[in-house]
Image (cartoon, helix red, strand yellow):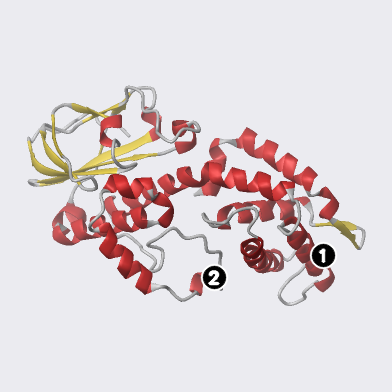
Amino acid sequence: MRLAILSEMPRDWSNRLTQWLRLNRSRRVEVAGEIVPERNVEYLFYQALLGAWPLDLGADDVAGIERLSERIVAYMIKAVREGKHQSSWSNPNTVYEEALQRFIRAVLDASRRNPFLTEFHAFVISLARLSAIGSLSQLVLKLTVPGVPDIYQGCELWDFGLVDPENRSPIDWGIRRALLEEVAAVSAADLAQGWQDGREKLFVTQRLLESRRSRPDLFAEADYQPLEVEGERSVRLCAFARNRGSQSLIVAVPRLVYGLYRGSETADWGAAEIVLPGHGTWRNLFSGRLLVLRDRVRVRDLFADFPVCVLLGESRSAVTNPNGVG
């Protein structure tokens, strides 16, 4: 999700890349007349590092950075071998791979003053909450749109694992069971405040899976009705309703979050409103609030307690919105 956000900030990303390439220029070496790493491989390195950097890792954590360095080295060697340009599984170029490893370890050396690590860590922190909200949006959509959701066991919390063998690592079910008990007794607002521990992702998963289990016909057979969103921030919201007989739900999640939050801790929804499919009483699945709504609702009200929203119908009219658009 951090990498997805980069598409919203191409100029800033390009400027930062230029800076990092300059900071790490002295760490590149020449092998057989070519610079290692070449530009494309170094670009991949920065992307992998951005995606894999743990939330609790500081730029001055020598042992933590060393562990991250080992992970990134393994990932990059696998990547260049599968790329088959400078090395491959069948014919490893050990000289090239050793030079690449030296570059990575030098770039990620936290034992001495390292301006790159300071700059890069600050960038990771600036995207951390936004990417978490994007992850929650994706999770809500996965569990509410028509179709069968695909959930990977072990991904109930924030996950920064790379490809194999990391994606085959043992799962700590003990911590997940313990956190599952905690989320049952904590408010959605409190979970959002302490979002770094991943409990809010587990909370969303638990609430929606429980709703699917208790309302199987709704999620399996309901229609899909895109809802109209009005206001200058409308492009940054995905909203739809699903109805089956007397059962209904409304889903609203943010998208393109970089421009929505603009460096703030709260989203700027302005006067954006969702045009509703009918009058009714709804319960917010995450906050528990009961809402009596008529023709429309302000988006900022839906996200007052939590960054994503699912409303379950308690009662509603049979009115539909024939002009609903995505």
Question: Dot 2: what SS?
Answer: helix
Disc 2 crowd, CA 10 A, few/some/many (<14, 14-19, 20+): few
Disc 1 crowd, CA 10 A, few/some/many (<14, 14-19, 20+): some
Residue type (three-letter) at the residue carrying disc 2: Glu
297 in relation to 242, above or below: above
Where does residue 248 sit, x and y in percent of width and height? 15, 45
Which quadrant of the view contains residue 297?
A: top left
Q: Give left or right: position of 300 versus 76.
A: left
Residue, disc 2: 166
Residue at image point 49% right, 36% down: 258
| Sequence-first tag of 2 and 1 | 1
Q: Nearer the viewer, residue 18 or 224?
A: 18
Where does residue 80 sit, x and y in percent of width and height? 71, 64
Residue at image point 23% right, 58% down: 184
Residue, disc 1: 99
Question: Dot 1: what SS?
Answer: helix
243 in relation to 8, above or below: below
Residue at image point 69% right, 36% down: 15
190 in relation to 199, above or below: above
* Labels 2 and 1 touching (C-beta < 8 A): no
Where does residue 147 sit, x and y in percent of width and height? 28, 56
Q: Quadrant of the C terminus?
A: top left
Q: Give left or right: position of 142 versus 286.
A: right
Q: Give left or right: position of 7 versus 240.
A: right
Q: Give left or right: position of 222 versus 143.
A: left
Which quadrant of the view contains residue 310?
A: top left
- Label for residue 181? none
Where does residue 289 sit, x and y in percent of width and height? 17, 41
Residue type (three-letter) at the residue carrying disc 1: Ala
